[in-house]
Amino acid sequence: MSSFNLLDKNSNFNILLAGIIGLFIGVGVARFSYTSLLPSMLEDNTLSLTFSGVLASLNYVGYLSGSIFAIFIKDINTKVKYFRLGIILCILTTIIMGITTNDIVWLLGRIIAGFGAAMALVVGAAIVMMKLNFEDKTKAMGIYFSGIGIALASSDIISRYVLSISTWQNSWIILSLCALLVAFYPLYILSFDKDLKQNVQKHPFNKALFSPFVIILIAAYFTEGVGFVIQGTFLPTIIKSLEGLEQYAGLTWLLVGLAGIPAAIIWMKLAHKYGSINMIIIAMSIQIVGILIPTMTTNVYLNLFCGVLYGGTFTGLVALFMNLGGKLAGANPVMLMGALTTAYGIGQVTAPLYAVSLTQWTGNYDYALYVTATIVFLGVLMLLIAKKIQTLNL
């Protein structure tokens, strides 16, 4: 019987565990702890609603720039270096949120945190995929992406526990310390004992990739970027603004994380059976229902269910779009992945800005949610049109 060694860099279990810890640091701590802690930060007037939207938008600017930058890092050894840099940046920019309230420092910190998160997720995913020793890595990568839900849930539990006994400032500090405590593991496991030699293929720009179907797919992914980010930034704050639901804001976000854990695996299995476009249309339609629930009712169970619908769709949609893009691109995925990532990122950057403007103008989040639901619905209509255009069996 072979001994179980958690320090074996080539163990598939260890590689996935290290990858998920990397997601906890990059996605849970550096990116989405902001969503958990935003209601408390707004409540004591540390920042205005407008500034909260600017901070969120800049975080996505950092993430977008990091995601695009990551696409052009071809050498796996360079990927390891940037992954390590990203993990360090995630920890440093998190602790900044707890030890200062300087606006300029926060603005810079959120941009850098977004870049670090992209290194942890996008570059981390590439390293995990490279290191895994499976003939078919699809299921294993599904487990890896389920780490996004684990990251959201675990960082939210830590945030809420510290908030229950202390302040939001201490929540940021404790989160960064938790990240620091576990950071050694992905930094060690997701590396190689010696530099690997890779034959990097260069693909020329191929305009033929951008068929009408692909252009519509890219536009639809922009609408999903908008749909993702409104709840990803403001959901606990939205729930807290509803009469009688103030105490359920944190629980709603925890349910987002828990629902996100199996989502990517389930949606990918369904896509394999029923087709990617069909599943994307269904997932986006479900997301629209979740977006609109807080505008229609203050029922506690329905609003908690709204968190489940959001968590159960957004990780799945990322996996579905990216998987379909990879299949359509064939041997030249970089350009198409870049186009999809850019469209999604532009949606993420713009959405918080119109959300806070509409909310300040109307005094509640309803119109921001109506606009968001309409934009995602346009994405669904685009994909229904794309289905008619596309004659290939995807």
Image (cartoon, rainbow, N blue to C red):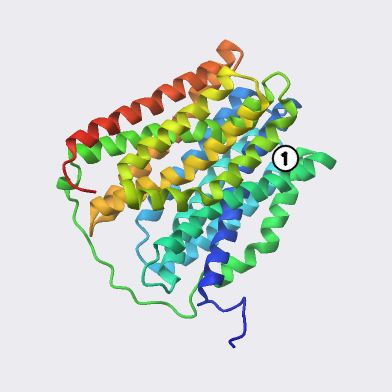
User: Which residue does the image show at 34% across and 30% down from the upper left?
Assistant: 380
- Identify whether 155 is placed above or below 130: above
- Identify whether 363 is placed above or below 230: above
Of 40 and 213, nearer the camera is 213
**Left or right, 93 with reference to 172:** left
User: Which residue does the image show at 35% across and 48% down from the upper left?
Assistant: 271
The 10 Å Cα crowd at callout 1, few under 14, some 14 to 19, many 20 or more, is few
Q: Residue furthest top?
A: 362
Q: Secondary structure at mark 1?
A: loop
Estimate the x, y position of residue 11 in percent, counting from the top left: 52, 76
- The quadrant of the rendering that contains the N terminus is bottom right
Q: Taking the image as drawn, is residue 346 in sight?
A: no
- Tally of numbered tags: 1
Q: Residue furthest front?
A: 273
- Residue occupied by mark 1: 100
**Left or right, 145 with reference to 187:** left
Estimate the x, y position of residue 49 in percent, counting from the top left: 62, 23
User: Which residue does the image show at 69% across and 52% down from the upper left?
Assistant: 176
Q: Residue furthest right?
A: 165
Q: Taking the image as drawn, is residue 325 in sight?
A: yes
**Left or right, 68 with reference to 257:** left
User: Which residue does the image show at 29% across and 34% down from the upper left?
Assistant: 383
**Left or right, 194 with reference to 281:** right
